[in-house]
Image (tube, rainbow, N blue to C red):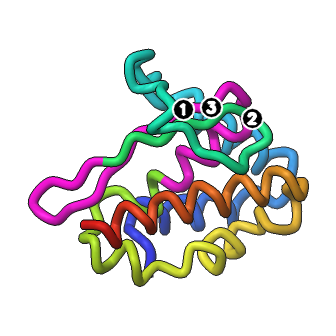
Amino acid sequence: MASPDFEEIVEDFEFLEDWEDRYRFVIDMGKAMDPLPDALKAPATKVDGCASQVWLHPTVSDGVFTFDGESDAMIVRGLVAVLRKLYNGLTLEEVLAVDAHGEMARLGLNDHLSAQRSNGVRAMIERIRLVASAG
């Protein structure tokens, strides 16, 4: 189960046949995100297991999950944007029900990311699930 915003990405990717175009699309999504305030780039928000610097700042309000994020690598910043589309606005139960790896596979990202980047995506997903399970 994915959010309607994520379904839009899936549809957009169907029109982008070339992986280079998809890669640029993901990078552009990251560029469009508001930067994470420096005060939130702290050890508590840093995601371990990523080759680049990554920070996620999740919030839960009235049982609805959202997060902001940042990375010093353009493609990873784009991947943060993709994960925001996948998870933001879902209830905690819905967050835990999302098959993130399956949803990301729908975009073909699993086939085109380096092992380090794939590990980073897994680390971000694990952090999101941990926050959701803690409620």
Q: Amino acid at mark 3?
A: Ser
Q: Is residue 130 visible?
A: yes
Q: Amino acid at mark 1?
A: Glu
Local crowd size for mark 1, using a 10 Å CA cut-off: few (<14), some (14–19), many (≥20)? many
Question: Is mark 2 in CB contact (under 8 Å) with mark 1?
Answer: no
Magenta-drawn segment: 59-83
Local crowd size for mark 2, using a 10 Å CA cut-off: few (<14), some (14–19), many (≥20)? some
Depth check, front residue: 106 or 49 = 49
Question: Is mark 1 in CB contact (under 8 Å) with mark 3?
Answer: yes
**Image quarter (top left, top right, bottom left or bottom right) of the N terminus:** bottom left
Disc number for residue 70:
1
User: Which residue matches tag 3?
Assistant: 71
What is the spatial separation of the Cα atoms under label 2 and label 3, in whole angstroms? 7 Å
Image side of residue 26 versus residue 63, left or right: right
User: Which residue matches tag 2?
Assistant: 52
Is residue 99 depicted above or below 79 in this figure?
A: below
What residue sits 45% from the left and 55% below the top?
85
Is residue 4 depicted above or below 78 in this figure?
A: below
Q: Amino acid at mark 2?
A: Ser
Local crowd size for mark 3, using a 10 Å CA cut-off: few (<14), some (14–19), many (≥20)? many
Q: Residue furthest left?
A: 62
Q: Secondary structure at mark 2?
A: loop
Disc number for residue 101:
none
Give percent across and percent down for residue 86.
47, 62
Depth check, front residue: 8 or 57 = 57
Is residue 100 depicted above or below 33 in this figure?
A: below
What is the spatial separation of the Cα atoms under label 2 and label 1, in whole angstroms? 10 Å
